[in-house]
Amino acid sequence: MRELLRVAVIGAGVVGSLIARCLTRYRCEVHIFEKEEDVGWGITKANSAVIHGGYDDPPGSVRARFCAKGNAMYSSLSEELGFELKRIGSFVLVQAPEDFPYLETLKAQALDNGLSGCAILPAQKVRDLEPHIADTVLGGFWCPSAGITEPWMVAIGAVENAVKNGARLHLSEAVTGLVTAEGSRGRRVVALKTVRGEYPIDIVINASGLWAEELSTLAGAYCPPLHPRKGEYLLFDKFDPPLVRSILFPIPSSVSKGILVLPTVDGGLLLGPTATDLPKEAREETSTTREGLSEVLYSARKLVPTLDPQWTVKTFAGLRPESPQKDFAIGKTEVEGFIQAAAMRSPGLTAAPAVAEHVVEEVLRRECGYSLESNDRFTPVNPPFVNVSNLPLEEWEKKIETDPLYGKIACVCNKVTEGDIRDAVRRGATTVDGVKFRTRASFGRCQGGFCLAKIAEILARESGRSLGEVKMRSGRTELLRGRVRE
Ligand SMILES: Cc1cc2nc3c(=O)[nH]c(=O)nc-3n(C[C@H](O)[C@H](O)[C@H](O)COP(=O)(O)OP(=O)(O)OC[C@H]3O[C@@H](n4cnc5c(N)ncnc54)[C@H](O)[C@@H]3O)c2cc1C
């Protein structure tokens, strides 16, 4: 019997995770290598979280090819993988008469890309939907299919599903080398080296985000030069009723889509991002700056003047992998078996499901000619991550009857119970951040001030570790240094 094709996916961000899951639809040996202790902690962790409509990428670009398709795929994906998706719609707001022709361009591109329901609305219609926008708004381009999600949950759901369907997840296992050999069609990958050992491999998918160029060099393959472009954000507390209901874009600048104002899935309000180019080496430089945050607030207030920085619960920054082409780099390379899924700048989150399907169906099966048999046992569905406090009261009470931990609130800001946290640990969270991203515990106003100790206690109890061994995230991030009174 022929051995199964061995495929390594480098990187468990939203792109690698969805590719890995797509691969498990077929009978092959899938390995996911991730250098961090959890999935979705790279670019996927810190971005605007918008599922873009797909009307503004330059016609003919790879981004345009995959954005609208990816957007359409998100509805079924969120049902299958159990993450939240809210199609709240987006506006591009016009504040100068000379910008109206740009909206006409967007409308034409939306039609070309097969989007329905997009329209240019007059100021009053926009204001009916968004009463807090600036008086200077003259109209807006409305796209009803745009939405918001929690990008890390897409990656968590996809990896969980891939593992359920047979993939092997190697966390905290950085890929350090790629071995190639001369084949009949030139050089081809034959093995992959990690911090733990060497694996014979037939195909390597490079979905390593900001590190894609380095990984390509290890294989001797071309990747466009990448540098980080920082985006800083302000996250505001929850509003009830919400201050803003849809995603508000300004007219874009030459470098980015501009600074947006948008709700988060859990009811907060997000402002940002800036766009600051950094040198190649600064791939972990996610600090926020006074200038950056001031720029965010200044620009966001042009759209919604009443925004008050006192509502801030958190500031953070994300890094885009920018290339001179300003486009995704997807496909086979000069090294046989080494496939790029790189340079995934915005709208990479939106495009990811379509890119994943393309890599497996078009690149691997059709262009490279790998024959892949269907995996008859493939199960597309994961149980959703449920926050029991969001259930109707009677259902929540029933949950408490089955387990009293569902009645004990650990995170007061986001009403997360001890039972939810315990479930998240049993489904893969190994650190406080792992719990936070899966449950939203410590994501709220107090940012963990009140619930951190409880989360740590549950993590320690469930994983059989001492409290001193519980970590915030990867590396040396233990919460406790030792006992005070011995
Ligand atoms: C500020 C900002 C705003 C954005 N807004 C949006 C938006 O609103 N909508 C949208 O559609 N897109 C948006 N994007 C783009 C989107 O976030 C990215 O396209 C997407 O998250 C990229 O995912 P990825 O899997 O390619 O990269 P990552 O999430 O970075 O995943 C790569 C993974 O590879 C791992 N890795 C790296 N090197 C190695 C190694 N040697 N061995 C093992 N593992 C390794 C990393 O740890 C990482 O987890 C935004 C991006 C930014 C930065």
Image (cartoon, rainbow, N blue to C red):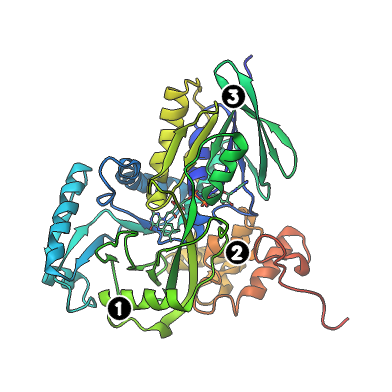
- Residue type marked 2: Asp
Badge 2: residue crowd in 10 Å (few <14, some 14–19, many ≥20): many
The percent position of residue 196, horizontal first and vertical second, equals 75, 43
Question: Does the CB distance between marks 3 and 2 fall below 8 Å?
Answer: no
Q: Residue 433, labelled with which disc?
A: 2
The percent position of residue 49, horizontal first and vertical second, equals 40, 59
Instruction: Name the residue that disc number 1 marks.
Output: 301
Badge 3: residue crowd in 10 Å (few <14, some 14–19, many ≥20): some
Residue at 75%, 73% in the rendered image? 480
Question: Does the CB distance between marks 1 and 2 fall below 8 Å?
Answer: no
- Residue type marked 1: Arg
Q: Looking at this view, is 483 or 392 the one in front?
A: 483
Instruction: Name the residue that disc number 3 marks.
Output: 187
- Residue type marked 3: Arg
- Residue 242 appears anywhere in the view: no
Mark closest to the chain's N terminus, 1 or 2: 1
Mark closest to the chain's N terminus, 3 or 2: 3
For the residue labelled by badge 1, is the local secondary structure a helix, a strand or a loop? helix
Mark closest to the chain's N terminus, 1 or 3: 3
Q: Looking at this view, is 100 or 420 the one in front?
A: 100
Location of the N terminus (image quadrant): top right
Q: Residue 275, labelled with which disc?
A: none
The percent position of residue 190, horizontal first and vertical second, equals 65, 27
Please state if 425 lies on the left or on the right of 234 as rendered. Answer: right
Residue at 57%, 67% in the rendered image? 406
Q: Please tell me in which quadrant of the rendered image residue 293 appears.
A: bottom left
Tag in front: 3 or 2: 3
Residue with the most extreme right position? 486
Q: Looking at this view, is 83 or 480 the one in front?
A: 480
Examine the rendered structure and indicate whether residue 183 appears above or below residue 247.
above
Question: Does the CB distance between marks 1 and 3 fall below 8 Å?
Answer: no
